[in-house]
């Protein structure tokens, strides 16, 4: 039996960058969704092929694996598992400028800070978290094809090293859709340094003011104001 893999030092907090649009009104679907998600304790788990990395889900199978009599069946199962699993993406960092640029509408959105322990303990038991591994070549899945669910998650937990700046963790749900957790897992809502003042005021009407933090640009750093 191979040695087990154990993680003893998970991060205390995870962060999620969000685009909330520029209109300070509930007709702004992005803004309304984020307000509801923060207040109710919700996160959307979507399809992997809708993520922004066009290389998501790619992998290699060596000659020995492809000659396995179960290969065609296993390949189909892996494909179906990847398609059916729901994914939500988080980061270990909140002050990474590229994350603000790419996922929070060029610093105009927000970043939600979650207590990782509370999040894990109050999500359904069917869910799991995985820390993304970064590599310079495609993952070779090896010859053990018994567990297609494990293989699908392994594939979706591996990305090219050019994405390493994201320090990403992924939440996996067996299906797509909204997951609920205890709202107290939300510890802060950090407003982007370019967020319009009208949107800031609007958010303060619906989100507990003790949760809200404003951020600013200081040289090449993003910091809490």
Image (cartoon, grey):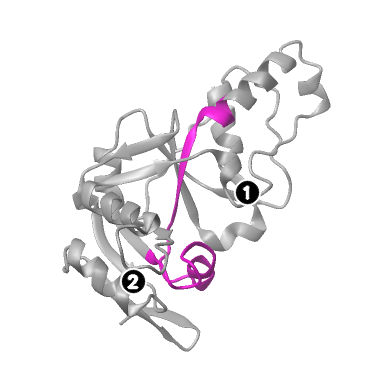
**Image quadrant in which you'd find residue 196:** bottom left
Q: Position of residue 8 (x, y in %)?
A: 37, 46
Residue 159 is tagged as: 1
Q: Is residue 94 above or below residue 88?
A: below
Q: Position of residue 177 (x, y in %)?
A: 40, 35
Q: Position of residue 135 (x, y in %)?
A: 67, 51
Number of the front mark, 1 or 2:
2
Q: Quick check: can you spot residue 162? A: yes
The residue carrying mark 2 is 191
18 falls in the magenta region: no
Look at 59% across and 28% down and name the residue there.
Answer: 151
User: Closer to the camera, 32 or 2?
Assistant: 32
Residue most toward the top? 69
Q: Tag 1, which secondary structure?
A: strand
Q: Quadrant of the C terminus?
A: bottom left
**Image quadrant in which you'd find residue 82:** top right
99 falls in the magenta region: yes
Horizontal side of residue 93 vs 224, given as left or right: right
Q: Quadrant of the N terminus?
A: top right
Q: Crowding near pointer 2: few (<14 within 10 Å), some, many (20+)?
A: many
Q: Position of residue 6 (x, y in %)?
A: 43, 39
Residue 172 is tagged as: none
Q: Tag 2, which secondary structure?
A: strand
| Extent of the magenta region | 81-110
User: Closer to the camera, 21 or 14?
Assistant: 21
Q: Quick check: can you spot residue 2? A: no
Mark 1 vs mark 2, CA separation in Å: 28 Å
């Amino acid at each position: 039996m191979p040695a087990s893999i154990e993680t003893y030092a998970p991060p205390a907090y995870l962060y999620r960058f969000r685009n909330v649009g520029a209109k300070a009104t509930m007709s702004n679907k992005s803004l309304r969704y984020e307000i509801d998600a923060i207040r109710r304790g919700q996160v959307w788990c979507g399809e992997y092929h809708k993520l922004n990395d066009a290389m998501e889900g790619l992998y290699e199978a060596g000659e020995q694996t492809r000659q396995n009599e179960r290969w065609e069946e296993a390949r189909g199962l892996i494909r179906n598992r990847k398609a059916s699993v729901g994914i939500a993406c988080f980061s270990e960092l909140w002050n990474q400028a590229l994350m603000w640029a790419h996922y929070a509408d060029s610093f105009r959105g927000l970043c939600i800070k979650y207590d990782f322990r509370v999040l894990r303990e109050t999500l359904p038991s069917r869910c799991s978290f995985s820390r993304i591994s970064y590599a310079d070549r495609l993952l070779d899945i090896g010859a053990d094809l018994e567990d297609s669910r494990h293989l699908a998650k392994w594939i979706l937990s591996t990305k090219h090293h050019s994405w390493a700046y994201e320090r990403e963790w992924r939440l996996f749900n067996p299906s797509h859709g909204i997951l609920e957790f205890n709202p107290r897992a939300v510890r802060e809502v950090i407003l982007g340094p370019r967020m319009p003042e009208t949107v800031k005021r609007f958010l303060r009407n619906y989100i507990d003011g003790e949760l809200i933090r404003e951020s600013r640009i200081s040289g090449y750093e993003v910091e809490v104001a």
